[in-house]
Amino acid sequence: MRSLQGRVAVVTGAASGIGRALAVELAGRGCALALCDVNEAGLRESADLARGAGAKVSTHVVDVADRARMERLPAEVLREHGHVHVVVNNAGVSVIGALADQSLDDFTWLMGINFWGVVHGSKLFLPALLAEDEGHIVNISSMFGFIGIPGQISYCSAKYAVRGFSETLLSELAGTRVGVTCVHPGGINTNIVRQSRTSSAADADEKTRTIDVFARWTRSPEKAARVIVRAIERNKPRVRIGFESYLTDWLKRLAPVTVQRVVGFGRRRAQPAR
């Protein structure tokens, strides 16, 4: 997009993490904001921060997996703001557990938010975006959209699906005034791991270890937000954030089968004998 000044942006998963950081960053660029999340208290805090940066803000309590609720959302945003120029499908959750241990209910819950939330946000706001002089859709995938990680089977499935959906949508919208960016973050210090569901005691232990790693070695949501907003301004179709995201992308290009075998072998060695 040539400029974000005076534009209207919809951000899902805006109550914390990357979503909150994006709200503040977009507000600083002159955007009005429609912030969406199931967490009403966190949503109010994000809205206050964005208003402090000078933005007009509306808040919408939304479960992105709920089709009926999402079908009502575009009209709500248009009533509040009159336009929609940017949609950021950011809402996401995590479940730690192998397929053998993970319940189908947990798998369905994650796919509803991480994949269907992206489909709902893209599909239902598309008519409004196409009606503008220019528009942009941002879908948050992951470095786990490049590589399959044992114990993250539902998360990887969703993020691979977001990648395929976004790449296809980019092709479908070629020649229109609507751009598409698929984002593949590496480690970002958000609440997603702390709030993840687990399938067993061993998975709960892994969650504790992962939380410690994220606290020590990951980058801030604010840094990720700056990269994403620059990608909107430059109409970049794909964004990788962090060295580990670039690394997994290139390793999978160079040796796609070997990399998965190595990852699986490392996982087996890390498991205690039974």
Image (spheres, rainbow, N blue to C red):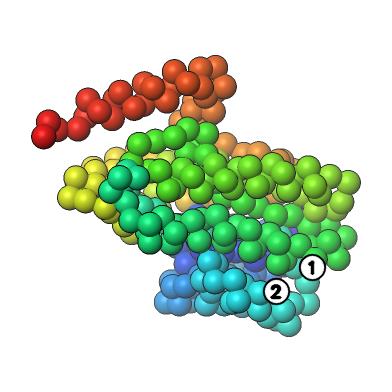
Q: Is residue 40 visible?
A: yes
Q: Amino acid at mark 1?
A: Ala
Q: Position of residue 137 (x, y in %)?
A: 70, 54
150 left or right, relative to 158: left
Residue extending farthest to the left is 274
Which disc, if any, is residue 74?
2
The image quadrant of residue 59 is: bottom right
Q: Are marks 2 and 1 in contact (CB under 8 Å)?
A: yes
**What's the residue at 73%, 48% (across, down)?**
169
Q: Position of residue 177 (x, y in %)?
A: 85, 53
Q: CA distance from mark 2 to mark 1?
A: 8 Å
Task: Choose between 21 and 110: the one closer to the eye.
Answer: 110
- What is the total number of numbered labels drawn onto the structure image? 2
Q: Amino acid at mark 2?
A: Pro
Q: Position of residue 23 (x, y in %)?
A: 57, 63
| Placement of 28 over or under 225, stated as above or below | below
Residue under pointer 1? 128
Regarding mark 1 in the picture, which secondary structure is present there? helix
17 left or right, relative to 72: left
| Placement of 258 over or under 182, stated as above or below | above
| Placement of 59 over or under 159, stated as above or below | below
* Within-10-Å neighbours for mark 1: few <14, some 14–19, many 20+: some
**What's the residue at 38%, 43% (across, down)?**
152
